[in-house]
Image (tube, rainbow, N blue to C red):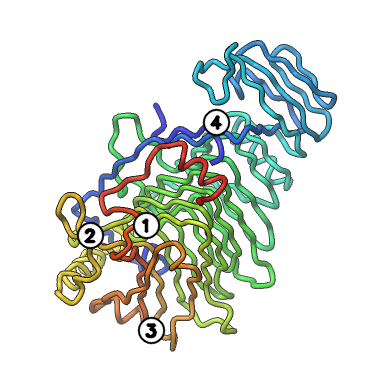
Amino acid sequence: MKKKVVLALLVVAIIGTMCFAAVACKDKTRTVVECEELTMLMEGNYYVGTEGTVDLSVALPGSEYELTATNATLNETILTVNATGDFTLKYKPEDPEAENIQADGTVTLKMHAVNGVNVTDWAGLTEAVKASKNVVFQDNITSEGKTSCNVLNSIFYGNAKYVNVNSIVKGNVDNRGNHGFTVRDNNEAVFQDLFIYGRMYGEDEAVVLENCEGYGQLIDATNNDNSKRPKLTVKHCILENSQKMVYLKGADCTIEGTVMRNGADALLAAETGAVDGATLTVKNSVFANSVVCGIILCGWTQVKNDNGYCTLNLEGFVDIYNWKSRDTAKLMPATEGWYVGAVNSLVQSELGKDEYNGYFSKGADGKDYVHFGIVVLATADLSANKSKVNGAAGVGLVQKSFPLPGIASTIAHTCLLYGIDKTNITIEPTESVDDNTALSYELIHGRE
C-alpha cells in the first residue's frame, strides 16, 4: 500500500473536552479531501545511534557502500558506530533520481552519530523510551497493540522514516482511541524529521476525514501538576490522518517546520485544565484539512493566575488551508455526540445571515467560503476569555467574533475566530498544499 505522503526528510473538537456521555450522531455529509503527495527534501544529514547496528540495505537501500570514519565500521552492509561524531557515507542508491545524486550515480551523505538506539520495530522503540534513551529510526515502524508509547525524556531522530500508530489511535465514540505518544510530568520529548500518521490511505483511496475519527491523538502532552509541565518539540515532521494531531494541557510546546493535516477535529488543540494552560509556539508550519478549525485554544476552567491561560505565539509563516463553505462550516466533529447535528445546523444557519457576509470570500468555484483558522473559546463561568494569540496579523489572520447559537452559547462564554483577511487573501479558498521544493525549503529555512 503506497503512502499518500512521501517523506524524503525534514520536513478541537470545538468542544473537545465536552465529551458528554451520549449516543453518537454521525454527520451525513462525508468530508472527502484532496491529499497531494508531499516530498520533503533532505537537508543532507543522516543520523545513526551508538547502540545497535544499522543494516544500510534497509535504512538506505542501495549498493557499493563506502565509509570514511574513525568512529564506525562497515561489514558488508552492516554499520556499527562506536562513538558520537560525524563521518561520511558514499553509496549508490536504488533510486536513480535520489536527491543530490552525482553523475556516477552515487550520493555522499554526512552522517551524524549520536547517543541513541537504532530501532527498526515498535518493540525496540518502546523499550528505548522506557529507558529514557534517544531513538534513531532506521526503518519504517508500525505500532503493535493499543498501548500508548509513554515518552520519558527522549529525542526521536526520524531520518525521514514513518511510524504508523493506527492500532492505537483508531476508535470511535463507543470505543475511544488512545494517544500514539504521550508525554507526562516534567518529561521532555523531541520529534524531528519523522512522518507520524494514524490511518494510512491507499494510492487510489479517497481521504475521508470522518474515517480518522475517534478520540485518539498522534501526540498527547498533558499534565495535572503545574510543577511538572511536560515539554514537547515537533520539528520538521508530517503528522496526518487522526482525530487531533497534537493535544496539549498544562504543557509547553514548540511546533516548527511541520505539516499537520487531515483531522476529524482540530489539528492542534490546547486547553486549560486543573492547572495552568498550555504555552505554544508555532513557527514556519502548515495546517490543512480539518473537520473544524486548524488550531483551537480552550479555557474550560478557572486557573489560579491571569497568566495561566493558553498562549499561542505565531512566528515566521503559519499557513492554514481550511476554508469552509456555508454548508460545511462546523464547530463540532461527529465524535462529540447526539447534539452535533443540531449545533452545526444552527451555526450554518447563523452564518447564512446577511450580517456575516463580510466573513466570506468567493472561491474559484463561485461558492462563498469562510476561513476557519484558529478558534479561541472560554466557558460561561469565566468572566473573560484570557487565552492569548500573539502574532496573528503577522501570518495574515484577523480576529472576528463568531456566532454561538443556542446550545453552544450556554456552554461557551466567548468564541473568537482568527481567519484570513478577505482584503489580503494569502491562501485561496479552493487552494491545496503544493508539492514543491519551495515549500520544503521554507519549512526548513523559513520564508523571505
Q: SS class of the residue under badge 1?
A: loop
For badge 3, the amino acid type reads Ala
Residue 61: give x, y in percent of width and height.
58, 18
Residue to which mark 1 is pinned? 265
Which tag is nearer the camera, tag 2 or tag 3?
Answer: 2
Residue 322: give x, y in percent of width and height.
33, 55
Quadrant into which the N terminus falls = top left
Which tag is nearer the camera, tag 4 or tag 2?
Answer: 2
Residue to which mark 3 is pinned? 380
Mark 1 nearby-residue class (10 Å; few <14, some 14–19, many ≥20): many
Dots 2 and 1: beta carbons under 8 Å?
no
| Mark number, residue 369 | 2
For badge 2, the amino acid type reads Tyr
Q: Earlier in the sequence, mark 2 or mark 1?
A: 1
For badge 4, the amino acid type reads Asn
Task: Using the image, determine if residue 215 lies above or below residue 101.
Answer: below
Question: In the image shown, does 112 or 175 lie closer to the viewer?
Answer: 112
Mark 2 nearby-residue class (10 Å; few <14, some 14–19, many ≥20): many
| Mark number, residue 140 | 4
Q: CA distance from mark 1 to mark 4?
A: 26 Å
Residue 272: give x, y in percent of width and height.
51, 73
**Residue 218 visible:** yes
Q: SS class of the residue under badge 4?
A: loop
Q: CA distance from mark 4 to mark 2?
A: 39 Å
